[in-house]
Image (cartoon, coloured by chain):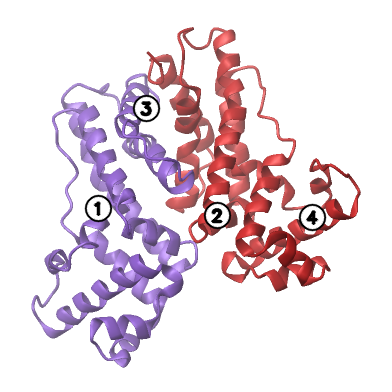
Chain colours: A red, B purple
Amino acid sequence: MTDATTTTSTTTTTTTTTPDRRPGGRTARIRTQVLDAVRAELTENGHEGLTVEGVATRAGVHRTTVYRRWRDVGGLLVDVIDAAGEIDWQPPDTGSLRGDLTALNEEIQESLLVRPSFALALMAASFHSEQAAQAQTQLWADRYAQCEILVERAVERGELPSHCTDARSLLVAATAPVYHHLVLQRAAPDPLLPERSAVAAVLAAAAGAFSVD
Amino acid sequence: MTDATTTTSTTTTTTTTTPDRRPGGRTARIRTQVLDAVRAELTENGHEGLTVEGVATRAGVHRTTVYRRWRDVGGLLVDVIDAAGEIDWQPPDTGSLRGDLTALNEEIQESLLVRPSFALALMAASFHSEQAAQAQTQLWADRYAQCEILVERAVERGELPSHCTDARSLLVAATAPVYHHLVLQRAAPDPLLPERSAVAAVLAAAAGAFSVD
């Protein structure tokens, strides 16, 4: 879920938590500077305004360094998406599936409503760059995989029938309406949607909608 | 739902069904030619490649005519979205809510998988043009309003509790996962998703997820 990626968009400091073989080394430092610049350019000017030169200037790094390591705008996009997947994001743990999914949806909603929104900028970019689209598909898959623990915990607590529930389908059903409302329909924010959508998914799951047989 | 808009993207003839004050008149004919050109340019080259000059050339219309009537690319986008809302689309009527929502989702899935996809191109454009985004928000609202009949029929048939169900929420819950899967996650098509997503929404609705109190 790209929601979590926004935590790196507002400050530069959080990106230093990105794991790197040589923390504090020159290579890691340059990556941090360059990816911070990509995030800033992307959120301010969108994908259309993203250039290797602009990123190099903003990062205070020689552009040949950027060309050598990232090659082009596509390479920069892929790495900034990969970096979003590296941050130490944890899915919510509120004690109930309904609470967890609501909290997840609140987080997603917030990431889509903040202006400028890095999450939105990434989604827009993936319409124009096949490389970015693929990296983002992987990021979505990783985030949803990470959230499967919510469903596992719900089964352990007896909130869901013990027969297998397709966790990914349940998670998509719970979260998709929030993205749909804000990213595609671009409708006015609905403060009740995160919880309503979570509740609908929980009720559907309890009725066996996502059971695997 | 932009799904229905794709019916105008593949052929030029279907756009002649667009209602117009003076069918066959010069104004109507020029609009048809210009909007056909916008759809073709948009699906082939995307929003970035859309120019008034390119549209005028393709339409075989003088560019001053296009500037005078549509002003700019934003005006062209708005009108092509408005035109999509004018086509004589009817929501499915299969005899059951599950069947109707599944058919609706199949239609949506098809519109997103066809290449080039006019529906996808419109969504991409709405990230870059505020005017296009607003026109599209209206189109979504109209399409969902048009689909509310599916829920009304289900209540009449006794498939849903007779207390009020928020039709729009139910419809969004049913359709959002299909858009989410193909437009945002850009995951591999899942032939079972249209029905699974429809069934989940029906089960949630039966359990009172979308009840209005």
Q: Nearer the viewer, residue B197 or A85?
A: A85
Which residue is located at x 46 percent, y 21 percent?
A: A166
Q: What residue lies at 67% left-to-right and 23% top-to-bottom? A: A93
Tell me the amino acid under the disc marked 3.
Ser
Badge 2: residue crowd in 10 Å (few <14, some 14–19, many ≥20): some
Q: Residues within 10 Å of mark 3 (few under 14, many from 20)?
A: some
Q: Residue at x 28, y 89 (%)?
A: B65
Q: Chain of mark 1?
A: B
Left/right of residue B135 with respect to residue B127 in the rendered view: left
Real-space Cα separation, disc 2 to disc 1, in angstroms: 29 Å
Mark nearer the viewer, 3 or 1: 1
- How far apart, in angstroms, are the residues tagged by discs 4 and 2? 19 Å
- Using the image as rendered, state which of residue B48 and residue B167 is in the foreground: B48
Element type where label 4 sits in the image? helix
Query: Which residue carries the number 3 mark?
Result: B211
The residue identified by callout 2 is A131
Q: What residue is pinned by disc 4?
A: A31
Amino acid type at mark 2: Gln
Nearer the observer, disc 4 or disc 3?
A: 4
Amino acid type indicated by mark 4: Arg
Q: Mark 3 falls within which chain?
A: B
- Mark 4: few, some, or many residues within 10 Å (few <14, many ≥20)? many
Q: Which mark is residue B4?
A: 1
Whether B136 is drawn above or below B110: the answer is below
